[in-house]
Image (tube, helix red, strand yellow):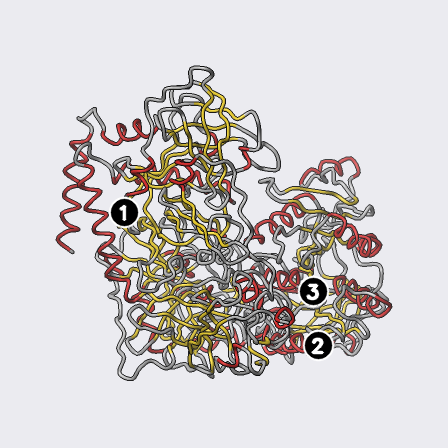
Amino acid sequence: MRSYLPLLALATAALGGLMLMPAPGRSDEVDELQEKAIKAAVNKIAPTVVKIETSGGTEVVKGGARGLIRRGQGPTTGLIVHPDGYVISSAYNFADKPSTIRVAVPGIKERRVARVVGTDQTRMLTLLKLVDLPPGTKLDVPVPAPKSEIQIGLTAIAVGRTLVPEVNGPPNVSVGIISAIDRIWGKAIQTDAKVSPTNYGGPLIDLQGRVQGVLVPASPQAEGETAGFEWYDSGIGFAIPLEDINAVLPRLMKGTEKEPVVLKRGFMGVLMKSQDMYEAVPTIESVLPNSAAERGGLKAGDILREVDGRKVSNYAQVMHQLGKKYEGDLISIKVERDNKEVVLDKIVLGSAEEAFPQAFLGILPIRDDPADGVEIRYVYPKSPAEAAKLQIGDRILKVSRPNAPSSAPLVELKGGREMLMQFLQVMRPGQEMKLEVKRKAGGKTETLTVKLAEAPDLVPEDLPENSSAKQALTPVGGKPPIKKPEKKDDQQPQKPPLKAETGFLKRTTPAADATYWLYVPDTYDPNIACSVVVWLHPVGKNKERDIEDFVDVWMTFCDDHHIILVCPQSDNMLGWTPGETDVVMEAVKSVQETYTVDRRRIVAHGMGVGGEMAFYLGFQYRAMFRAVATVGTALRGNPREKVPAQPLTFFLAAGDKDPVKPALEETRDKLRKLKYNVLERIIPNMGVEYLDGRAGIKTLEELIRWIDSLDRM
Amino acid sequence: MKRLFALLVVVWLGLSVADRAVADDSFAAIAEEVNQKLVKLFGSGGFKGLASYGTGVLISRDGYILTVNSHILDTRDLRVHLYDGTRYNAKVIAREPVLDVALLQIEGGMRGVDIEHYFDVFQAAKRPILEPGTHVLAFSNLFQIATRDEPMSVQRGVIAAYSKLAGRIGIFEASYRGNVYVLDAITNNPGAGGGVITTRKGELIAMIGKELRNELTNTWINYAIPFSARAETTDKDGKKTETSILDLVTKKEKYKPLPEAPKVANQVFHGIVLVPNVVERTPPYVEEVIPGSPADKAKLRPDDLIVYIDGLPVQDINTFNTILANYVPRNEIKLEIQRGDKLITVSLTLERPIDKKK
């Protein structure tokens, strides 16, 4: 990370030099003019740029969670947006949920206490209200630069209030240009001025002192308060146009300290046929029940043609229109249905909070099985599958399409386990599903109807050891492998079983800037997909010796259950930082490239601060992680919402003497409120330690079975 | 303002055509002039990711050099390359940890050296402080890109801020705690320490510092120490002494071990009992006020939240202890506390710890 910054800087310096220093002799005049213009613009905006200081964090006060993902704890910046004492800032500055917030306003003698009254989750902004302003105070408000005038190449000055102690002194500045507009699905403008925690929340201004936008960390790949932090000072920075902020300000200002307004992304509630955002025709695979799309009349099979009057030919273009919308916003869509164009006007976008618990059939599938259908490995007691008398060894060959009329023909499960899972993901408990099953006993084929239920808080104790058909290298959905011995060798190279090393291995990331360790069971077989457990150590347990100790505890489980351990190392003495996600992700990706990995069973597992990192990874990288397992950790702040196509489940463990316990219970309730599946295990007679003692080991064994059953459905 | 902007555009358009015709480029001339006064340093390092090279600035005819006080000086074999590629050995005359600078001299044998190009550091120290937004140039041998007689790498940026390095900006590991320029350019890289910041006319302003992390924001910081830098140190009796870069250059004093400021907490008595410090960021809430103590006289109450000590933000109990460790009895401190929705300022005079009073 660090190493390429200077290069970028040199490159930009060279470019800047070309543009700004054209003139021998007279170049000075140009420079002087520009310098004057910059200083004048900064002076003009300065009275509206405030300094924000915080202390503590709510959970910390309650004696709950230990440690955190470190955000710096210095002052941050905000911008006055309303004369009555409203200040907008980057949500990054409040990611650690401080217990008290104080704001220093230029020209006002004393600092003021402020409260969070609103959050814009789509643009990662927080609105503060200053409490106790002298009566009749009217604060200066900046002038927005019209969005239509913001163009690539214009000078852009990033202004912060963090480096100089006196709020009436000059703010800190960084000078650059507008690099792009309409970034992050139409929500942000991009600049090469240096954007970092020293100016997050501050304004990006033009040479006339008008505000182009409010500086935030942002990333097109991830969401969350801290996403994009890793790009600080790199010449890649983002700002949310002030015009857009002003447009939603009245809504945000309705919030109070007790009931803050939270603006959320507007969801349509459809799943697309293809995951490919760019190449595939945007065709709806299924419409989620009770979603905006269902209410608005969208149907499975519809091809999206226009969104808000703009033609769309792929899902990325749909996102460009949809990505900037809020819950409750209107959208109009033109679709192609049965070769006819249908216009669906004024669809009211919904929220992800209409989330529903995962529909549960009650089986575990046999894995690594390329044949059509799904063979049953295990039937959960008291589940719909048991009620329908499904048996181990039965093979589900066909199912009804989700939310299709009951007369519709059943579809063949050519995609195996993945296909059945995808179907179940868009269904709710209580809905019916028809199955065509080939019985193991007798070989007869029957059609059954099951009423789906909610997944239970249960980890089966009697998991059958036979979990895999051991054909992970054969492409799924194709024909069962044809037995032609002489050709078998030709088939293999499709995904050559790389010379995969096993045992306790030390690795470095491709950039060689971080070390991590792997444990690959000696029983590794490329034809059996492994689950991956990423171990995020607690504070101070980052030495090779500590990692070895952890691996020792897990080793036999790994060997027996085909689990690969990935143990990255945090360099930070005080715990993991968001910037270290890069290293973790690189480690996991490299494991995926080298070994056969079951994508449905990648687990972020951590203790203490490592557990917070596990939560963070789970919420930020949903395409990767399917489960989060923590020991002695409570979630700071609020969990992110459920995403139907990317399920995430939780296993929360702690000792009953661990002071984190009350906060852990709060975490459990918060997650369940969002309809996540959560297992909580409080271990008697255990304090702040890893699953230890007889009861601890029992929980660890349960965790291993939980990982083995993550592909339940 | 609109007119000014329009004017700028016109000037640019006008000049970009005229440019190419002129051979004598004033920027190149400035760069050449500055480069002649800089040296490449080679010393200890090359392991554990520490660079074994650095930059220095010539400040006298007899070959004195200023650079940052860094690990590369931990050697007897310190070598200097002048701008024209001439090689010399150099010796460390004095290292000043509280300013984080060091004075070196080129070893010119019996005859000594006669340096033609050097900066007047006394004049540099007199220059007025530059405002944020002022264009500056940074010259250094970052990443050792330049070898022997090659010129330094030049970067262009603006002054981002002028502020104290310690406490405010959040650098706690730096030994120099005074004012620095924060730069809007990625200047502080391996080997860049000891390089210079000049105005766009090549006037000497400041010396590029080390690679440091800003603890308050958890980011790397780019800063330079102005040649007017001064540092104040307090000895154990609370007596203050002052030193500066100019002092160092004038006195050519050897390494000056300064008596350490008191670092042990609880050397002072304030009478505030804070809530138990159970987690990493426990906010400094007052749990109890000892009757008759300075805190009691200042009318502090349980449940008050201490938010600033002498203007320094106090985010948690650890910070509270760190800051107070710098005070001695009889010092007066200004506390800002949050009581409900109000911020209140009180002053209290610290006393000797109770057990030591007897």
Q: Check disc 1: other Cα within 10 Å, few if <14, some if 14-19, many if 20+.
A: few
Judging from the image, mark 3 belongs to the subunit labelled A
Provide the secondary structure element on which disc 1 rests.
Answer: loop
Label 2 and label 1: CA atoms lie apart by 82 Å
Q: Amino acid at mark 2?
A: Val
Given residues B218 and A188, the one toward you in this image is B218
**Which residue carries the number 1 mark?**
B128
In this view, the residue farthest toward the top is B110
Q: Residue at x 57, y 36 (%)?
A: B50
Judging from the image, mark 1 belongs to the subunit labelled B
Q: Amino acid at mark 3?
A: Ala
Displayed quadrant of residue B23: top left
Label 1 and label 3: CA atoms lie apart by 58 Å
Circles 2 and 1: CB distance less than 8 Å? no
Question: Is A152 on the left-hand or right-hand side of A429?
Answer: left
User: Which percent across, then down, holds residue B337?
Assistant: 47, 76
Given residues B1 and B239, the one toward you in this image is B239
The vertical placement of A538 against A7, above or below, is below
The vertical placement of A531 against A619, above or below, is above
